[in-house]
Structure formats: structure tokens, C-alpha cells
Image (tube, helix red, strand yellow):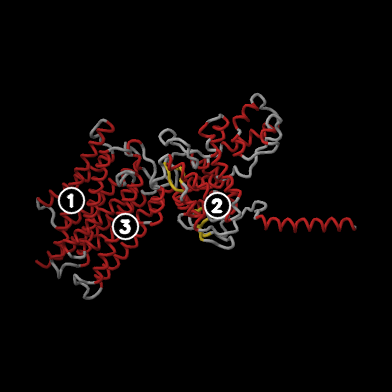
Amino acid sequence: MKRCMMSLLALVAMVWLGGIVQAQTGSSGPEKPERTFAYSKEILDTFGAIPVQDGGRIKPLSTLAGFKMLRFYGKRSMKSGGLAPEETLNPEAWLLDCFFFPEQAKRYPNFVIQYKAVAVAIGLDLETKKKRDRYSYEELAPVRARLDQVAGAAFRKDSKERDLVERQVVNLWRNVSDFEDLCRFTAFAGNPLPTSALDSVSDLYGGRDPELPEFLALAPDFRQRVIGQESGPAWQALSDKIDSMARRNIGGLGIFPPQVDAEQEPEWMAWPEMITLCLQGDPAAMAEVPLMETLGRVVASKNDPAGFEAELSTFAGEIEARAKARGEYARIPMERDFYRYDFFYRALYAFVLGFLLIAFSWLRSGAGGKGSWLVRGAWVFSSLGWVLLTVGITYRCILRQRPPISTLYETILFIASVAVVTALFLEWTTRRRIGLAVASFLGALGMFMAGRYELREAATAGDTMPSLVAVLDTNYWLAIHVTTINIGYAAGMLAAALAHVWLGSFFFGKGRKDSGVRAELSRMVYGVLCFSLLFSVVGTILGGVWANDSWGRFWGWDPKENGALMICLWELLILHARMGGYIRQFGLAIMNVLLGLVVAFSWWGVNLLGVGLHSYGFTEGVGFWLTSFYGLELVIVGLALFAKYMQDRRQLVERT
């Protein structure tokens, strides 16, 4: 009994002394699965500025984190859920947890499920969930096999044949798989390879099991020693582990830039692909091992905030130096500023405020004076919104080293900018507050559309600045054609918007006391229509020049070419009908509203066909909104025609 008591006291003393030593030396002790400190601004900034290669281009980790969170969660800010204390995580903090504290990140409500039928299809328990709700990885883990099964069945169908639930299941499967890759990003650290059981290589690593960076540093020697000895349980265990690590894709995220010129070796490396290359003695891969060791030290220090910040800064500095040597770092700080300033979201607020002020100026009694503070405020905010939008477009041009339009997302930004500045010019020349109202409304609508479409870009391309297909890259005639034709689109949509204002004055009787309002509106519509025709015709011709240069033929009756031709023909029809006296102010307004349908079809509709040489613009999920737009516009035209019929009939009765 006495010996047992002495042993117990000795054990307590050892534990107590161990705690003192740990406190004095700053050792983090056993690895902790959860983060116990808040990330400092320095950590977040350092991490966010690290360049990586993803989706075919070099971008900062802050961009990657923002679009991953947007794709999974639907927002760029996340509550940590039921974890205590609850945090509001920005994209950088969230991605840091995925990389370094994956067990904690798996409990965040990472995934949004839009429809109850999706949750039912994969076997989720819905007792405590809403129809549209968010789920953590831990909640999805029990049904992971079922998700694979349902998604696999959907993948066996053509994408156009999948129903809504199947498309949502496929998206969820992709999101969960990508999240798993992110959580395995640092899986090589603290995961030793069982080499000590192999007699031929046990002394190579000092008789112990090395972690992956140490193993790769001596990989060529290892290979030479084991050639012809690949047999037995010990070798099979090591082989299985190496194979398992090498097969991990890590989302295609390259974080190790080769120490050569970017033109000689454009591809950055992810650590799984380094395994095979190092075993083959590839010098480029061997040169990456010290960087991998540095990243391993970052992982080892993750429970010590000061040490973590220092090691992360060292790792980021080494990546930055290599990227600069390769000429691939110059635009990283600018891209971080672009997303930090969030020009388009701020422009949305400015346009909305401008529209509200001009709307109040219409409602406020006696506010019709040209010097009204409401009108001046609307000018300020509408102009500010246009400046923010244009600066944002300019940033994108510099970042991409391209003209302002190369994706459907960018057409929204450019068309909104052109429509707004043209409407502001109309307001400056007419002083009717009509152009100002239309400018702020179209600006707000364009920014809202851009924000919604950004979600789709995040889900499909993973970014709004993806790598382009070869035919769209670096062609002078393409750049001129696309810019010109989109100016035509913008003017056509502006003419349609002004035509709506004319019909609004017709419906609600505006202009009976001021007979000049409708006439002024008709002149605006006519002028913008002519402007649209000029750029539509020139843009279509330039498109033929590009097609001849790229494909060897000027015209091929491609759906996109037909859509551009339809705009030109419809606008010519309107002008000839007006010149011939077949239509007057009412007819001009109706036909310009229908012009909006023609432009929308050429802009979006033909891309949804998924055929032709322009099918690279195909995107899912837009068809519903486009069809809704068609339906709404046809209802407006139908109501206008009915109101005109009733008015003409009433006037006929009054005359008789």
C-alpha cells in the first residue's frame, strides 16, 4: 500500500513538473483539434495575400476563400454556428480553419441546401431544419455514401436531362468533395510514413518514421534502396500510404511555385503530385521540398498564436519571393484591393439611393424645380454609382490584361455602365428627371443582376475571372467586336427602358397637363434607338471579321450571329415604320419594348441553346428568369394595346 501511494505521488509530481516546463518553454503540447484563439489582423492579411494557382491563373488566397465560401455557403461571411464562443468568420478565417483546424471547420454550417426535396433525396433528418437551411459537414457525414449514390445516378444523365433536385444534388456533392479537399490541405503534416519497419531504409531516416517533407528530401535515395525489394506487409503498408497521399487532388490547388521562369514551367505544384515526381528524382519537385517543410512548421505551430503568425509570415514571404522571381506576383495586391473595396456592391447602394431621391422628388409637392436638393442628391449618387462601377471594370481590365468583356458576367457590368452614362447624358440635355430616374434604376438593376450571376460563376467557374477558351483569348478583332456589340445591347436596353416610361405615362395619364413629356420621351427613344443601331450594325460586321480571322468564314448562321442580326433587322423595322408613318409615339414605344425582348434573346437566350460555335456562354439556371422576363414584357404590351384600344373606342364614341 505504501509503495502504491509513493508511486501515485511520483506520478502527480511528474505531471505537475511537466506542466511547469511546458509553460516555461512555450510548448504547445499534444495537438489540439480546435482553435482556441482569434486570428489577428496580421494573420488574416498575411494568409490572404499568399498567391496560389487555381483555375488556370494566379490569385491570392483571399480570392479563393471568398469564392469557395460564396459557392458553399451563399455569402462571404459565416457564423460559426453553435460553437462557443460564436464567431463571425470572414473568408480568410474560414479557410484558415479548413486548412489548419479541419475538425472545427467541419462543424460550421458550410453548406446551403435550397430545397427540402434535396435533403429528403439524400436521407437527411429534417426534424430541426427549415425548408431552406444550412448544414455542417458533420451533419452530412452520415449520409455521405447516399449522397455519392444519388449524385452518381445524376451524373449518368446528360446535364440537360437532370431535374431541379438532381442538379442541386450534383452541386452539393461537388461542394462537399471540394470542402474535403480543403480540409486535407495540410494532411501531410503529423502523418509519418512507416519506413522504420523496412530494413533497407530504416537507417536512412535514423530508424524512425519520417513525415512527408523529410521523406521526400531523401526520396531518390529511398527509391534506389527499395528497387527489387517491394514485397512483404511492411512494404505494402508504406506503399498504400504513399499511394493514398499521392492520389489526393486537393482541389487542384497549386501553392508551390517552381524555381524557374514562368514560361518554362507555368504550373505550380500541389504536394500530392510532388510525391511521384520526387520519387522519380525530378529536380523541380525536389526544389519544392524546403517550402513544404516550412508549411509543415506552420502546421506544427498552429496552437501557438505568436509562433503561428511568425511561421506563416515566413512561408508567405518565401512564396511571394518565388512568385516575384517568376513575374507572377505584380497584380496580387491589386486583386486584394479590388475585392476589399467591393466596387460593385457599393455602386448598388449608390444607385438605390439615387433612385430613391429622384422618386421622392417626383412625389414631393413643389420639388419640381431644377435646383431641388433631391434632384441634386440623385445626380450625386447616380454619378457616384457610375464612377464606382467604371473603376471596378477598369480594375478588372488591368487584372486580366484584357478589354472589359470576356464573360457573360462582364457583359452585365459593361452594359450597365454604358446604359447609365447614356441616360445621364440624356438627363443633362433634357433636364426632365426622366434620364436620371432611368440611369439610377438601370444601374441598380445591373448591379443586382451582377451580384446574382456572381453566385452562378462561383458555382460553375469558381471565379468571375476564369481562364478563357483559346478562341476567346488575345484576339484584337474579338475585343473590338464584343465591346462594340455590347454598346449596341446597352443602347437597345436603354431604349426599351425609356419606352416603358412612355407607356407608364400613358397608363397613368402623365402628360395630359404637360403635352411635351411624351413628345420628349419619344425623341429620347428615337435618339437612343439610332445610337443602338449604329453600334449593333458595326459590331455585327466586326464579328464577321473576327469569325473570318478565327474560323475562316465571315458568316455561318450561328445562333449568336443570328441573334445579332435580329437586333439590327428589328431596329431597322422600327425606324422604317416610323419614317413611313405606320407608327407614331405609341407604336414607337411598343416596338421598343419588344426590342428589349430581342436584345435579351441575343444577349442571353442563344447562349442557353448550348449549340453553335458560341456555346461557350452556356449557363444553367438563367432560363427561368429569362422566360419570366419575356412573360412580364408581353403582359405589359398586351395591357398597353388593350388600353389603347379602349381609348380609341372611347374617343370614337365621343366624336359620334
Question: Residue 543 appears at what percent x and percent y?
Answer: 24, 39
Q: CA distance from mark 3 to mark 1?
A: 25 Å
Mark 3: few/some/many CA within 10 Å (<14, 14-19, 20+): many
Mark 1: few/some/many CA within 10 Å (<14, 14-19, 20+): some
Q: Which residue is mark 3?
A: 388
Q: Which disc is residue 546 wearing?
A: none
Q: Which residue is mark 1?
A: 531
- Among the 4 quarters of the image, the one containing residue 569: top left
- Residue 183 falls left or right of residue 55: right
| SS for dot 1 | helix
Residue 299 visible in this rendered orientation of the protein: yes
> In the displayed image of the protein, which residue is found farthest to the top?
228
- Residue 249 falls left or right of residue 447: right
Name the amino acid, label 3.
Leu
Q: CA distance from mark 2 to mark 1?
A: 59 Å
Which residue is rendered at x = 36% and y = 48% of the image? 623
Residue 160 visible in this rendered orientation of the protein: no
Name the amino acid, label 1.
Phe
Name the amino acid, label 2.
Ala
Which residue is rendered at x = 64% and y = 53% of the image? 32
Mark 2: few/some/many CA within 10 Å (<14, 14-19, 20+): some
From the image, state whether disc 2 or disc 1 is nearer to you.
2
From the image, state whether disc 2 or disc 3 is nearer to you.
2
Nearer the observer, 494 or 463: 463
Task: Judge whether 634 appears above or below 364 on screen.
Answer: above
Question: Residue 209 appears at what percent x and percent y?
Answer: 67, 38
Question: Residue 236 appears at what percent x and percent y?
Answer: 67, 32
Question: Residue 121 appears at what percent x and percent y?
Answer: 53, 49
| SS for dot 2 | helix
Q: CA distance from mark 2 to mark 3?
A: 37 Å
Q: Which residue is mark 2?
A: 310
